[in-house]
Every structure is written in C-alpha cells, then in structure tokens.
Image (tube, coloured by chain):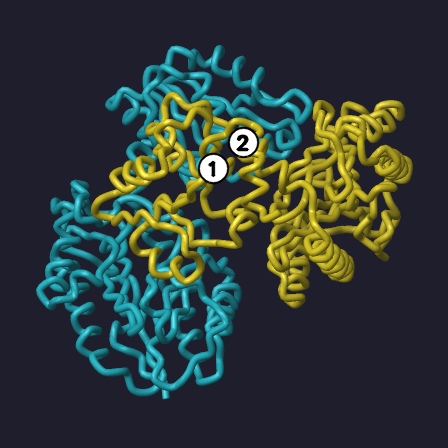
Chain colours: A yellow, B cyan
Amino acid sequence: MEKIDKLRFLMKETGVDLIVLSPGANLNWLLGLNPHADERPLLFFLTLSNSAFLMPELEAESARQHTDINFYNWTDASGPLQAIDQLLTDLKGFSSRTIVIDDTMRADHAAIVQDKLLNATRLFTASTIGTLRMKKNEGEQRTLRINANQADIAMESAWNMIAPGITEEEVALAIQNSFSNQEASPQFSIVASGFNSAFPHHQTGSRVLKEGDVIVIDLGGKFEGYASDITRMATLGSPPKDYTLVHQIVDDAVQAALAAALPGETAKNVDKAARDVIEKAGYGDFFVHRTGHGLGSEIHEPPFITSTSETILEAGMVFSIEPGIYMPDKFGVRLEEIVILKEDGPEILSKLSRKLKVIN
Amino acid sequence: MEKIDKLRFLMKETGVDLIVLSPGANLNWLLGLNPHADERPLLFFLTLSNSAFLMPELEAESARQHTDINFYNWTDASGPLQAIDQLLTDLKGFSSRTIVIDDTMRADHAAIVQDKLLNATRLFTASTIGTLRMKKNEGEQRTLRINANQADIAMESAWNMIAPGITEEEVALAIQNSFSNQEASPQFSIVASGFNSAFPHHQTGSRVLKEGDVIVIDLGGKFEGYASDITRMATLGSPPKDYTLVHQIVDDAVQAALAAALPGETAKNVDKAARDVIEKAGYGDFFVHRTGHGLGSEIHEPPFITSTSETILEAGMVFSIEPGIYMPDKFGVRLEEIVILKEDGPEILSKLSRKLKVIN
C-alpha cells in the first residue's frame, strides 16, 4: 500500500479529517518532497479525498518541478489568509472535526490553521504519521545500516584526534569532516570531556583535553535522508576511580534492555529493564533521561523508550538503547546502540565494541 | 537600558502579560543563551516582574552553568505538564490576558502553553521582541560588517569555481568551505544556473554548468551569532539575449530602493520604489517577492520590506534590498545588498560591484 493510502486508512480509523504538514521529515516521508522552508507558510493539506499546498508565490515555480498537487499561491503583498480560505473551502476543510498539525511546524504557521478551525480537536503528527513511520521497510533498514557504518567511522576519526592539548571543538570538527568525507551531512557531535561528561547534552566547547579525562562522544549524521546516532566512551590514559565500575553498570543496563526488546513487549518494559539495573546498583538518581528514542529520517522520533510508554514494539522498528549515569562534578557515562527490532530480538547496527576506549 | 528592561517596557506599553520563548534567535538575543533544543519542551517564561525556565531534567545541569534563572524541571517519565502548572502558578501566569509566543516555537510546544491559557489573546514575537531587535547597536553593526566581508569572500570563491562541467553543488561546496575557512558557519548557498535561475529559491542540485549559463548566487553565513546575505549574478561566457537589459532594470530598482530608504520613510515606500522601476519597464509580473527583509541573528527578521508594510524605518535598522525578475524557461536576475540605515541613508555593506560577473 502507498504511504498516502496507509495514512488515509489511519485517518479513517482514528476519525481524523485533515492533516496539515510543513516542510520537514513528515512531508518528506509522505511525498518525498523537501521544499524551501522559511517564515512564509508553505503547508500541505491532506483530507480523505483531496490534497493541496498553500504555496508562497516565489516558491511555486520551483516546487512545481517536483509535484502535480494543486497549489494555492499567495504573495508577499497579499499574505496567506485569502489563499488558505479558498483552499479550505475547496477541500471542505472548514467542517473538520479533528485535525492533525505537524509537531515541528512553526507556532505562527500553526496559528493560521488553528484560527481558521477553532472548533476542531487538534492532534499532532507524533500520534498519527509518527506511528506509521516507526516501522522501517527493507530499503530504509539498509540505509540505516549504511548510516550506522558511517557513524562508526566518524567515531574512530574522533578517537584518532583525541590527545592532550586538543579541544573538544577540534574533536567535533574531526567528526564533521569524517561525515562530509563520506558524503553524509554531519548532524551533531557532542564531545563532553572531564566534568562536562556529566552533562547529557553538553555543548561542545573550547575545553582542552588532558590526561585522566573521561570523554563522552555522541555523534550522528545523515545520508540519503536517514540518520545515525551512536555514543561511546573514551579516556585519556587511565580512567578515574570508580569509572570501570560505573561503565560496567551502564553496559549491563544496555544488555538488559537489549534482552527485553522483543516484538510484543511494551517500550516501557525495555526502559524498566535498563533502569532496574542502574537503580539496583544504587545509581538511579543519576540516570536522568529515557532509555531511548526512535531513529529514522529524524534523529529523535517515535517510538520513545520511556518509563511510561505503552507503545507495543514490533519487528521493523528502529530505536536507540542508551542508558547513562551522570555524576555532577565527577564524570558521566553513556553507551548508545541503535537497533532494528527483528522477530527474534534486536539487531545492533554498530560494529564498535562498547568497551572503554583507552587512549594513551 | 538592558534588553530585558526594554522588553518589559514594551510589554507594559502594549499590554502583554507573558512572553514565552523557545531556544533560538529571540532567547539568544535577550539572554545570550542557546540551550539544546529537541522535542522536549524547554521554554523561557517572562512576566513584568518574574521569569523562569521550563526545563527538561537532562538539560538542567548543563543549562545551570549559564544562568541563575529559576528552573522548573520535568523528566522524560513525568512529562512537562505538572512542571508548567507549578511554573504558571508561581509566576501568576494563569491570569494572563495577553501572551506572546515565539514565532518559531514548535507547534506541539506552543500547544502546551496555549492549552493552559485558553482565554488569553495570543500574539507572536515578530510584533514584540522583533521590533526591538530591528535596530542594531554599534557592536551588532560591526559584526554585521564582518559578516558581509566574509560573504564577499565566499562569493569570490564561488566565482573562482565556476567553469563548464562543474555542478551547482560543487560551487555551493566552495561557498561552504569559504565560510568554514573564515570560521563562519555556512547557512545557505543557492546556486541557480540556466533555467534554474528563474526559481528565486532554487534548490541547488547536480545540474552541470555550461557556456552561456546565467548563474544566480545567493549565499550567507553566520559569524559570532550574526548573519550575512548577498546575491550577485554571473554568466559563463556571453550573456543570453535580453540579459543585459534585464540586469540593468534590476540594478535600477536596487538604486531606486536605496534612494528611497531614509529614516522616517515607511518600508512599503522602499518596496514601491523598486517595484515601480520594474513595473514601468514591463516586468512587474516577474517580480514575485518582496523587496527585502531584516538581517541580524536571523537571516530573515523584521523589518520586512513589503508592499503593505507600514513599518517606519529608523537609523540602525539593517535590511536587504533585493529586487528580482524571474522569467520561466528563460532566466532570472536578482541583485541583493544588505544595508545599515544611517541618518542620511543606507550604508551598503558589500564591497562587491553589482555588475554582471562574466566568467570566460
């Protein structure tokens, strides 16, 4: 079944009358379109029987090269309000009882839609398109494997750069160059050294690496529209006191989550498996985030592996398992695998060991 | 006066009770903070007398290094709803009659705020913080001049790359490398060749340049938090029939807009000056966008130079003047200057001539 048919089937099942998307992962997944996005609303409207674009005049000629869907153009002079009125009239959108808005749509664009449909119940894409995007087909899985391999290579480039006197930013640059050299686009590169390793989303900066540093490296790129994401641990010289113990606990948590991840299980059970290991070891207060997130065309997408998620895991879903322990003013440890869920359990995409990389 | 005092003065003047910002240009302008942004709502709340952050637990330790403002933390397990209730109670936000939401906030995050304050009138940042950001101080102007100089150098790198057999993407890569080499981050690089030049926001692709091509190059980077933006025209060999005439009309339109841009004038008069030139020459239907946009920490920000904008221009404002003529299946011409408005008129930041660059 085509993606658009699947989506309309879901709309019918869930009583959704209208879906409105902005340029981004959902539109690209649905139509393979990636139009220019800026402060001018460019929105795709989908009903059970029809579809149309609200289109800034200056984008129309270019967008027309990629789609035959009807455009309702508006100019910088007129603004979008008349065009959206005509569009909603023609698509019978004004009678919508339930609408779905793209999660990542700009708030000012979403307001234009919502103000026209004040009586409609408003949902977001995470609970509609998001659920369709969770299961990856064979082609998507292949692309994600290629991405994972690129990320492994980028991680090795980072390790090769680590030395006393080098800054976090210089290691990050090595990661970005590695992705670029592989024709992937670098997406993020967290290099968190010393005390910074205790910040899960440390903003990579000018700190200079030195002997004894614990270094969290969490990186990802995009290739052919899909993403990678991996976290590994390194130290410059011997790890500090307690490090080996904490690393082992985090790795045990990864293994427990991997063992729990089976089709038919809930996402929250996978989170629980990892969390139980860390809590039993006495470090529960230092595991300050969910166990994982889906990965696909977005770096974070459903399914989310949280302690409250009732999502039932299915073969074909792709997600991270990435427990961590973060001890302020000491150090942090996170280990992250991306897995494709198979009938008999998770396939780990990275070929890199989760062992500590000691750099001398 | 501090930015936050200026903003509160404006809030009082305009009857705004609460401003809610997400990570991005407005928050960075106001507080110099650039926290990690993802699908977890991280929001800054400002009232006339108080302020606070809604803060994902895993970001809190890192964000705390940069600010003393109160945090209302929430975890991946609990979600943000209880924390936002407590925050709004403590800040007396529930009695807000008028609230301002960040334009670029994700729609799902904005919904969390709006659903708590259903009876409040909702405005967006463009009409509040946006108006404060329009006038750039001396330091900002200096940084924008540096950015403009970097963009000139990137434009010359692009011209040096142009040759028969080279793709648009290869020219774009030269632009990106030029910015990177200048320690700026590349933001966009439109290389629109041949018929593609008739698309104002052409998506740079694999088209191979050949003799006789018209090439629009529109590029920008960011350095020290501020942006650049410039458009120039090149041809590979002799320009096609009519090109020289159309180029001259666009340049005349630029000059007319430059002459009209004076403190005290409306933005729409500047647009009209450019548009009149193009309309009188008989090409009005092919000028499909506004004459310009503000430039600062965002590439597009107020003031917008449109045919309907009543914004009164003031010394210190920074904006583009960029009329264009786009003839489908033929070619397009756009010339773009960034100017700082001075008491006696615009200061053009680029040192590059607007003449056609003929590459042989």
Q: Toward the viewer: A127 or B129? A: A127
Q: Residue, x 39% and y 29% (percent of image)?
A: B101
Whether label 2 touches label 1, CB < 8 Å: yes
SS at circle 2: helix
Q: Residue, x 28% and y 51% (percent of image)?
A: B293
- Mark 1: few, some, or many residues within 10 Å (few <14, many ≥20)? some
Q: Toward the viewer: A55 or B30? A: A55
* Picture quarter with the N terminus of chain B: top left
Q: CA distance from mark 2 to mark 1?
A: 8 Å
Residue A328 seen anywhere in this rendered image of the structure: no
Q: Circle 1 is placed at which residue position? A: A48
Where residue A345 sits, quadrant-wise, is top right
Question: What amino acid does circle 1 point to?
Answer: Leu
Chain letter behind tag 1: A
Number of the label disc, if any, that sits on residue A4? none
- Taking A179 as reference, is B112 left or right? left
Q: Circle 2 is placed at which residue position? A: A12
Dot 2 or dot 1, earlier in sequence:
2
Chain letter behind tag 2: A
Indicate whether B149 appears above or below A189.
Answer: below
Question: What amino acid does circle 2 point to?
Answer: Lys
Indicate whether B40 appears above or below B84.
Answer: below
Where residue A60 sits, quadrant-wise, is bottom left
Q: Residue, x 35% and y 73% (percent of image)?
A: B195
- Mark 2: few, some, or many residues within 10 Å (few <14, many ≥20)? few
Q: Residue, x 38% and y 74% (percent of image)?
A: B193
SS at circle 1: loop
* Picture quarter with the C terminus of chain B: bottom left
